Image (spheres, grey):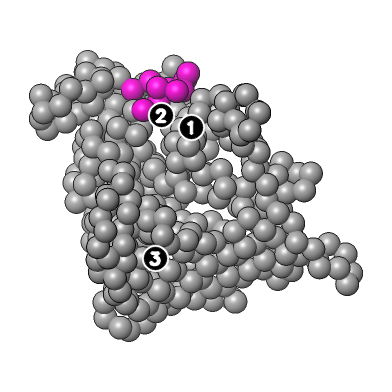
Amino acid sequence: MSRFVLIGFGFRAAAFHRVSEALPGVRCVGAVVREPRRRALPVPAYGDLTECLRQARPDFVVTAVPRMATPGVVAEAVGLGLPVLAETPPAADLAGLRALWATAGRSALVQVAEQYLLMPAHAARLAAVRSGIIGTPTQVHVSSTQQYHAMSLIRGLLGVGHDPAAVQAVRTVAPLLDPLDRGGWTDDTEPRPATTTIATLDFGGGRSAVYDFTTNQTRNLLRSRRLLVRGTHGELNDDEIVHLPAPRTIARTALTRRQSGHDLDLNGFDTETITLGGEVLYRNPYAGARLNDDEIATATLLDAMAAWVRNEGPPPYPLAEGAQDHLLALAVEDAAAGGQEITTTVQAWSTTEGEG
């Protein structure tokens, strides 16, 4: 059994705790919070990390605090020799990323809780792209999630690693009804100004990306979520692949999710598999736990973190990767704000061998 403690207990920390309850090999044994009596926590609350370490004896910590506070919290944990799974983004700005890397990067103790490529649909798409069915990927369009999450999808699907990118971006504002937010249905009947950011990223070598995000798009169901991966031999468009399986033959093949619990299926509502023809691209490792896609991804992260800490698996998402995601996200924001092309440069985390 691997034991972890949370630092903070807001929305994301609560999600980590909730998911851990469904995992047989991972247990949350406490939370470090500023005001332990402010709310009733489902785990013991501690006033500081040193006390928590002494009493709860965790194998690793999960930080879920505001991005401005994350570097300090991570540095404290690393100073105590604790492996860390840090919520995204690991710092607020480029200066913060550089300072965090200087403090904790070479410790090889820090992972980032980037979950998007672990979500069932995205994991299946990534498996399809890596199978070579669309050839070499050359362009990715993401219109679904914000900033660093979108950059993780772009980098993972395109396979660009830490290559520099030339970034151009624009912003527009238009009224939009916002029926859902983090708290659920808003029952708001008046459209309000929403900002759309559209950016292009050129990684060189014929590899590029388009980023398209509107305020609250991750939760606003009045805006579609789209993912397109173009390759040398075809393309993946959301849940369909067009490709050339034989000479003079164009085929469209669907990615099909097997979802139990519909109609007369009495197995209970759950995700089982995602297939491409007769090939299983993704199989839910938590079938029976009734987890949604984000919870499945979070569970996968926690299990991967626990295995890594036990030296039984690879690092789930090293700090260098999370830092690179946010570097690109910041470049998009700077390009949109200034109206000029921004070219990213190689950073310290891209040239070190300290991670992993």
Question: Distance of mark 1 from mark 3, alpha carbons?
Answer: 26 Å
Q: What element carries label 3?
A: strand
Q: Which residue is drawn at 61% across and 34% down?
A: 262
Q: Nearer the viewer, residue 320 or 10?
A: 10
**Residue at the spot of label 2:** 19
Q: What element carries label 1?
A: loop
Q: In this view, does 42 lie to the left or right of 247?
A: left
Q: Residue furthest right?
A: 247
Q: Which of 300 and 52 is in front in this view?
A: 300
Callouts 2 and 3 close, C-beta under 8 Å: no
Range shown magenta: 18-28
Rendered position, 63 above or below 193: above
Q: How crowded is mark 3: few (under 14 residues within 10 Å), some or many (20 or more)?
A: many
Question: Distance of mark 2 from mark 3, alpha carbons?
Answer: 28 Å
- Mark 2 or mark 1: whose residue is earlier in sequence: 2
Q: Which residue lies furthest to the bottom in this view?
A: 340
Amino acid type indicated by mark 1 = Leu
Q: Nearer the viewer, residue 90 or 110?
A: 90
Residue 345 within the segment the image draws in magenta: no
**Residue at the spot of label 3:** 213
